[in-house]
């Protein structure tokens, strides 16, 4: 049963723009993710994680390459047929929750059911079950503005599950949550793969799931890389001079075409105010023209 391929991509490439300003955000990526697998996508900021996930979820057209969701090639589907496949087969969870602000928690959860013909019938029952399971029942009639961050993300997870899709894609789902709440959200996603056999792909900087994931795909400059256990890709925070691991760093800024990584928001803010003050001694890229790092 677990041999069944839920997401298959071959030669996936996305180029933004053209000519001198072209950015090859995803570069010839191939992957095969099976039923019930829990896969993490990790990599430095700007490495192409969101672009890759958006293409896998049918939200963004690739420049070239092919994507099959549960055996159906979505890259050749017309714009008219794509929404139906997306609504049935794929649940998407975003860092910023993306709830509709004028709908209650329950209405948000039910929303995708309205996009599937005949999806309404069992949806109310299923929404109730999901509200229960995600400990949201007392909040069902609340608007998003009256929910905590963790509750909003649980609503977004329930919304992603309402049509029982086989594939759940989450783009930095804990990025706006505190550490404890983020961990709870990660464990819910983990259980969705383990208990329900759904395929779950999570883009994250959070290393706590590394040990329970089936696989980690490391992205660097749009390519999937082998990364040895405990390998680091060190960059130097230009402000405090501390070493920062580019694989897991979430704070960065690009200045004059060079990417700099930061240990904290404080250092990033200082740099933004006065980049020149910090660059004199640190800008010595070794082995890479694109970052301030050295490995
Ligand atoms: N809509 C866009 N137009 C042009 N360039 C983009 C766009 N979206 C992302 N990029 C560029 O593509 C690269 C990968 O971005 P992204 O997929 O957002 O990376 P990540 O999610 O790993 O931070 C970056 O260099 C980014 O600046
Ligand atoms: Mg991203």
Image (spheres, helix red, strand yellow):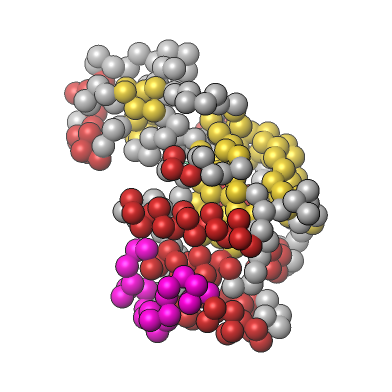
**In the image shown, does 1 or 261 lie closer to the viewer?**
1
Residue 227 in the image, given as x and y percentages of width and height = 55, 26
Q: Which residues are magenta?
A: 130-150
259 or 86, which lies in front?
86
Q: Residue at x 42, y 35 (%)?
A: 248
Q: Is residue 213 left or right of residue 187?
A: right
Instruction: Determine whether 69 is above or below 40 in the image.
Output: below
Q: Quadrant of residue 195?
A: bottom right
Residue at image location 41% in from the left, 17% down from the top: 294
Which residue is at the front of the view, 14 or 20?
14
Residue 293 seen in the figure:
yes
Q: Which quadrant, please, contains the C terminus?
A: top left
Q: Quadrant of the N terminus?
A: bottom right
Query: Residue at image x 47%, y 13%?
Result: 287
Give coordinates of residue 258: x percent, y percent: 39, 26
Q: Nearer the viewer, residue 4 or 276?
A: 4
- Residue 173 sits in which quadrant? bottom left
Q: Is residue 278 above or below residue 188?
A: above
Q: Position of residue 285 (x, y in %)?
A: 39, 15
Answer left or right for 35 relative to 15: right
Tell me: 21 left or right of 177: right
């Amino acid at each position: 049963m677990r041999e069944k391929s839920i997401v298959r991509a071959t030669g996936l490439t996305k180029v933004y723009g053209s000519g001198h300003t072209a950015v090859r955000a995803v570069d010839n990526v191939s992957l095969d993710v099976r039923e019930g697998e829990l896969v993490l996508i990790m990599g430095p900021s700007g490495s192409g994680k969101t672009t890759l996930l958006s293409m896998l979820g049918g939200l963004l057209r690739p420049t070239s390459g092919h994507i099959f969701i549960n055996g159906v090639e979505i890259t050749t589907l017309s714009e008219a047929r794509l929404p139906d496949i997306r609504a049935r087969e794929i649940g998407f969870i975003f860092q910023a929750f993306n709830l509709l602000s004028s709908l209650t928690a329950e209405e948000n959860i039910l929303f995708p059911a309205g996009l599937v013909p005949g999806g309404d019938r069992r949806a109310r029952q299923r929404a109730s079950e999901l509200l229960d399971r995600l400990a949201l029942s007392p909040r069902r009639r609340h608007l998003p503005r009256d929910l905590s961050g963790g509750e909003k993300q649980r609503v977004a997870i329930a919304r992603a599950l309402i049509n029982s899709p086989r594939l759940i894609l989450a783009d930095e789902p804990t990025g706006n949550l505190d550490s404890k709440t983020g961990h709870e959200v990660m464990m819910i996603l983990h259980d969705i793969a383990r208990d329900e056999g759904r395929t779950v792909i999570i883009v994250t900087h959070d290393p706590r799931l590394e040990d329970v994931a089936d696989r980690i795909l490391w992205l660097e400059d749009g390519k999937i890389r082998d990364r040895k256990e405990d390998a680091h890709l060190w960059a130097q925070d230009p402000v405090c001079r501390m070493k920062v691991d580019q694989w897991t760093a979430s704070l960065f800024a690009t200045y004059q075409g060079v990417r700099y990584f930061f240990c904290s928001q404080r250092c990033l803010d200082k740099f933004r105010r006065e980049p020149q003050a910090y660059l004199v001694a640190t800008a010595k890229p070794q082995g890479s023209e694109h970052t301030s790092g050295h490995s």
